[in-house]
Amino acid sequence: MTDAPGITLQGDYLIEQKPLFTGVDLTVPAGQWTCLLGRSGVGKSTILRLLLGLDTSGQFNGQVRANDDRAIGPRASYMAQSDLLLPWLNLRENVVLGARLRHEKPDLSKADTMIARVGLSAYATKKPGALSGGMRQRAALARTLMEDRPIALLDEPFSALDAGTRADMQDLAAEVLQGKTVLLVTHDPAEACRLGHQIALLTPAGIAPWELPDTAPIRSADDPQTLQAQAALLSYLRAVP
Amino acid sequence: MNRLRYPLFAALLGIGVWQIVIWATNAPHFILPSPWRVANTGYEYRSLIAQHALITATEVVVGLLIGAILGAITAVQLAAAPRVANLILPILVFTQAVPVFALAPILTLWFGYGMASKIVMAVLIIYFPVTSSFYDGLTRVTPALLDLAKTMGALDRQVMLRVKIPHALPSLGSGLKLAAVYAPIGAVIGEWVGSSQGLGYLMLLANGRAKIDLMFASLIALAVLTVTLHLLVSALVNRMNRMSHATPSA
Ligand SMILES: Nc1ncnc2c1ncn2[C@@H]1O[C@H](COP(=O)(O)OP(=O)(O)OP(=O)(O)O)[C@@H](O)[C@H]1O
Ligand SMILES: [Mg+2]
């Protein structure tokens, strides 16, 4: 795996001839965290799927490319909005699913480390049915982080967690995905202001950029500048169509 | 024991209704023998019935195994090649329009009077239910899961082995439960058409000699055989489901 590439997506998206968004121009700079926000149903998950080259129900007119012109899909790890754990596998087997599906020898000790870091060591041999929603989300995060790819596309990866666990998981993801190109979909202004190098707001009329403090993430939660950005972002989000 | 209470009660009810019909219609014993007569005859001929039941049971179990394996292999092959499946599935459905009963004489001609033709009958009758229920399960994996596998760079073979097949095991299970009930039908039809052993043969023989009690006793032996097989397969399938899916899949 070589260096993490920057990614751009430009174009319009139609569902049954009706535009969902038009004139979108999204740039995800190489090796940085970009947070994608926007109202529910505006098309954030759709954008992740377009970047990955997965089928979507609508029609996309435009282009998706990496700045090194190589394919994105095979270099990206993906965490979908639902956990997608296999109910018949225990947690550890779920976490090494990628390697199993590629018919590679899974790195079980790395998996155990990752499971420990998402705080689920005691549940490593339990099946997903025995875990809470937040635990399942952390298991899915561990599975995603195992994939060690230069690009990570994360769809609301921390949405089911309490504030404390969420901050822990954000720290973990920031550490493991250091130097990778990350696109994080989130509804949480605090999360975006804490983790993002930049913020992109998706609206039906395109991407609106949003200025963040000049400091590097992870920004401390009690930093006045961060707090201010967060408050401003919240009121802006409420005003966005 | 609790699980047996209702089936036992149902059996008693059936026997009760049977006896009441005899009282009500005054049917002579060579038309409709009483439960008591049949039980007596069954006891008297127990070793003869057991000997023929063993033949039928062998045909059914062997047919069930072969049919289940063939059906499962077909389903996996079809699920692995959607284009081929689109071609083959309509043909499979079309073959179901041919009553298996009509094939029995031909199968007897081809495979002889022994067990082979009955096993083939049983296989033919269960092949489709097993194939189609397993195939359904294999092709109904959540698309999001297949997308995830794709982003992980999964190999088709591994997706089949580790995602589709485990997901479809409960569907295969329902197919097998059905098959356990169908397989004896196939075997007995085969025996009717041409054989010198098995419960189907014994029934015809008893009928021909106007031994209606023996015919009923054989029929009940066949029913017991079928129910036992169904219960065994159900227990096996439920166990398999519990092992593979700790909870109902999301
Ligand atoms: N399978 C589908 N079939 C038809 N329409 C779909 C399908 N999936 C999504 N859509 C439509 O696409 C639009 C965008 O969906 P998408 O999942 O990208 O939204 P989102 O921004 O991720 O929303 P949320 O924040 O609620 O997750 C929605 O309005 C939805 O109606
Ligand atoms: Mg979404």
Image (spheres, coloured by chain):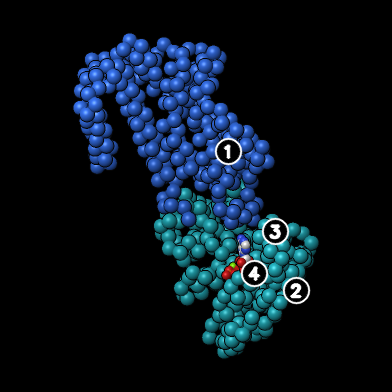
Chain letter of disc 1 in the image: B
Task: Determine if marks 4 and 2 fall on one subunit.
Answer: yes
Of the pair B117 and B138, the residue shown nearer to us = B117
Q: Residue at x 53, y 27 (%)?
A: B99
Quarter of the image for residue B57 reads top left
Residue type at mark 4: give it.
Gly
Residue type at mark 3: give it.
Gly
Task: Determine if marks 4 and 1 fall on one subunit.
Answer: no
Q: Determine crowd level at label 1: few under 14, some 14-19, many 20+ residues with C-alpha closer than 10 A.
A: some
Q: Secondary structure at mark 1?
A: helix
Q: Quadrant of the N terminus of chain B?
A: top left
Of the pair A74 and B166, the residue shown nearer to us = B166
Report the residue marked by disc 4: A43
Report the residue marked by disc 2: A23
Q: Determine crowd level at label 4: few under 14, some 14-19, many 20+ residues with C-alpha closer than 10 A.
A: some
Chain letter of disc 2 in the image: A
Task: Let me know if residue A193 appears in the view.
Answer: yes
Chain letter of disc 4 in the image: A
Which chain is cyan in the rendering?
A
